[in-house]
């Protein structure tokens, strides 16, 4: 049997729409950013406005003296007693996106979970290559941990979560938190179709027709972040914080939730990463959704598998 889109996904997003997308040459990060952010704006324009969720912006200093924004999303009427919080890193292939671009999505997740979300406005490649994005995220996580009490957060109950590139950054944060002995440690990491391995550059032909994030896109994103080091045989010191699949040791990481569509080009790296977490005795929950490409939940939010994926993710947050 050959691979195919799940019928509900195909009905929600006609394959000819994907085929009509412009094809930018490898390395053209800025054209991808312009097109990608317009596409995200269109997708999110169909997301209902979220009532009853407030947003508060916090300006925080970074490791290099810069200032970034942490946006706090909080459901009105929830307990003011310090409790669980999500530290969120948005997606965008390391080259596009922002908290503002993903605002409706983040507010929706806050409303659905009932848990405050602190979303970090990290700087993007290629203008800000590695280690800036992950270090921005690290600065924000340290800020949240240190200021937890006055933010209404229990510092022992911080969950890191991200999708796509944000999932990779969340995994990199978990490695950094372990290595730097963050105290209290991260409670859990939730990695949604995460972008983990800069060596995912050789096309798997069976997946190419279904790729909503293509191999050329992937080469571009990693190249913007890592430059000539992207895809290299030998990892450089600190490489694993950008590409967590490069980490030699996964022991001591927090309990992990991972999911991925079977038609996503990240499926093999995500399966391998989940397997290595299990081998390292890290409590791990892993879901594969057949017939689903990258970011299927955004493209077809009302399809059965998207609803199932959302249900599983929310349950993982609840159980943290």
Image: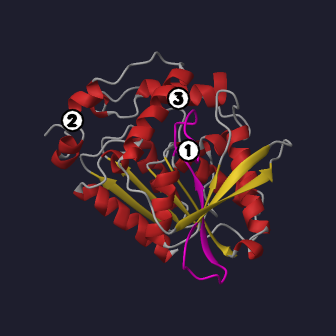
Q: Is residue 53 magenta?
A: no
Please tell me the numbered disc located at residue 33. 3
Placement of the N terminus among the 4 image quadrants = top left
Residue receiving disc 1: 245
279 or 105, which is in the foreground? 105
The answer for how far apart the CA atoms under marks 3 and 1 are is 25 Å
Q: Nearer the viewer, mark 1 or mark 2?
A: 2
Residue 302, how many percent across, how many down? 26, 55
Residue receiving disc 2: 14
The crowd level at tag 2 (other Cα within 10 Å; few <14, some 14-19, many 20+) is few
N-terminal of the two: label 1 or label 2?
2
The crowd level at tag 3 (other Cα within 10 Å; few <14, some 14-19, many 20+) is some
N-terminal of the two: label 3 or label 2?
2
Please tell me the numbered disc located at residue 98. none
Residue 239, how many percent across, how many down? 67, 38
Per the rendered image, the range of residues in magenta is 74-101
- 141 versus 135 height, above or below: below
Q: Is residue 232 visible?
A: no
Q: Is residue 85 magenta?
A: yes
Circle 1/circle 2 CB separation < 8 Å? no
């Amino acid at each position: 049997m050959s691979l195919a889109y799940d019928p509900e996904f195909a009905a929600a997003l006609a394959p000819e729409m994907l085929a009509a997308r412009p094809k930018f040459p490898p390395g053209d990060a800025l054209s991808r950013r312009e097109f990608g952010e317009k596409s995200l704006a269109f997708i999110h324009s169909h997301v209902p406005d979220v009532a009853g969720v407030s947003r508060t912006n916090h300006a925080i200093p970074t490791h290099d003296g810069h200032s970034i924004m942490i946006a706090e999303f909080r459901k009105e009427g929830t307990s003011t007693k310090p409790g669980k919080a999500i530290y969120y890193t948005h997606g965008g292939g390391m080259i596009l996106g922002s908290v503002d671009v993903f605002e409706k999505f983040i507010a929706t997740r806050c409303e659905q979970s009932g848990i405050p979300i602190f979303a970090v406005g990290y700087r993007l490649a290629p203008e800000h290559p590695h280690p800036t994005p992950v270090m921005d995220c690290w600065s924000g996580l340290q800020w949240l941990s240190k200021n937890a009490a006055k933010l209404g957060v229990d510092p022992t109950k911080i969950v890191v979560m991200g999708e796509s590139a944000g999932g990779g950054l969340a995994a990199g944060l978990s490695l950094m938190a372990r290595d730097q002995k963050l105290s209290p440690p991260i409670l859990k990491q939730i990695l949604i179709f995460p972008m983990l391995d800069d060596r995912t550059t050789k096309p798997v032909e069976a997946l190419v027709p279904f790729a909503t994030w293509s191999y050329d896109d992937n080469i571009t994103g990693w190249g913007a972040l890592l430059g000539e080091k992207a895809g290299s045989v030998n990892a450089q010191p600190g490489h694993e914080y950008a590409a967590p699949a490069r980490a030699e040791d996964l022991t001591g990481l927090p309990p992990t939730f991972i999911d991925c569509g079977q038609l996503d080009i990240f499926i093999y790296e995500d399966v391998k990463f989940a397997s290595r977490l299990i081998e390292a005795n890290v409590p791990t929950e892993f879901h594969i959704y057949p017939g689903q490409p990258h970011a299927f939940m955004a493209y077809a939010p009302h399809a059965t598998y998207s609803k199932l994926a959302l249900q599983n993710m929310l349950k993982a947050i609840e159980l943290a």
